[in-house]
């Protein structure tokens, strides 16, 4: 209907919402098509913020599919636009996602650098939930590197952050499980658990 009555920009916004729904259902090819259609509309409309959102979400869908090279390309393009717009929360979101891509690629030093950058931005913004998530992601990277002490410290910081803010939610349960896993491992024991635990979180407009 939006297309029929000629409100193209709004149809692009709706396509973003459709992409989120399709990705959540595991229909990645359809989600990518929706996002790419939305991306062109947002570019034509000159909406750089939503263009960056489309690029970011396309990158996350590729990550969910295990296509880390394409994911990295789109997330880097999203980061470039978000830095130009000077949107700290959006920059932090993309930096965290890039950390996940680098982790999946086994590029742990780059992953840690991305997570640290994201953590700094979330802490500056007072966003305890997302800061705790970055601590936990760093802990997982340390675990993959068999740096057990660093892994435990980072995961403890994650749990303390959420408990200190009175947030007793699903994330806290997940972070506690990761901490317990790290504590149960012998020193310098390699991690054999798969990196993939859940789908990346996609953004709606």
Image: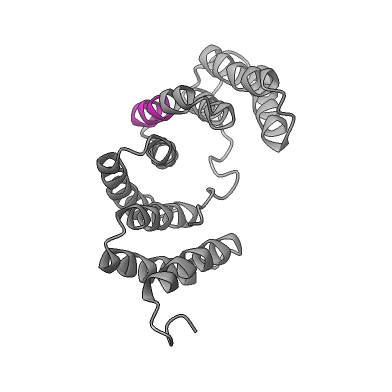
- Of residue 134 and residue 179, the one placed in the foreground of this image is 134
Residue 122 screen position, x and y as percent = 47, 28
The magenta segment: 108-118
- Of residue 117 and residue 46, the one placed in the foreground of this image is 46
| Most frequent secondary structure within the magenta stretch | helix
- Of residue 189 and residue 81, the one placed in the foreground of this image is 81
Residue 70 screen position, x and y as percent = 33, 55
Residue 195 screen position, x and y as percent = 53, 40
Residue 69 screen position, x and y as percent = 32, 51
- Of residue 97 and residue 192, the one placed in the foreground of this image is 97
* Residue 180 position (above or below residue 170): above
Number of numbered discs overlaid on the protein picture: 0
Residue 109 is one of the magenta-drawn residues: yes
Residue at 71 percent across and 37 percent down: it is 170
* Residue 13 position (above or below residue 139): below
Which picture quadrant has residue 196?
Answer: top right
Most extreme residue toward the bottom is 4
* Residue 111 position (above or below residue 52): above
Residue at 72 percent across and 32 percent down: it is 173
Residue 107 is one of the magenta-drawn residues: no
State the colouring used for the structure image: one colour
């Amino acid at each position: 209907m939006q297309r029929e009555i000629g409100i193209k920009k709004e149809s692009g916004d709706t396509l973003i919402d459709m992409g989120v729904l399709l990705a959540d259902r595991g229909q990645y090819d359809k989600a990518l098509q929706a996002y790419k259609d939305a991306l062109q509309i947002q570019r034509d409309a000159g909406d750089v913020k939503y263009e960056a959102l489309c690029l970011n979400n396309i990158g996350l869908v590729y990550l969910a599919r295990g296509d880390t090279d394409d994911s990295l390309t789109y997330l880097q393009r999203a980061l470039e636009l978000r830095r130009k717009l000077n949107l700290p929360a959006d920059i932090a979101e993309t930096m965290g996602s890039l950390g996940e891509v680098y982790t999946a690629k086994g590029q742990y030093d780059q992953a840690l650098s991305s997570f640290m950058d994201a953590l700094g931005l979330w802490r500056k913004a007072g966003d305890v939930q997302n800061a705790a998530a970055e601590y936990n992601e760093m802990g997982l990277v340390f675990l993959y590197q068999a740096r057990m002490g660093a892994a435990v410290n980072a995961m403890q910081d994650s749990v303390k952050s959420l408990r200190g803010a009175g947030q007793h939610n699903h994330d806290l349960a997940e972070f506690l499980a990761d901490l317990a896993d790290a504590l149960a491992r012998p020193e310098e024991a390699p991690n054999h658990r798969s990196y993939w635990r859940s789908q990346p979180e996609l953004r709606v407009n």
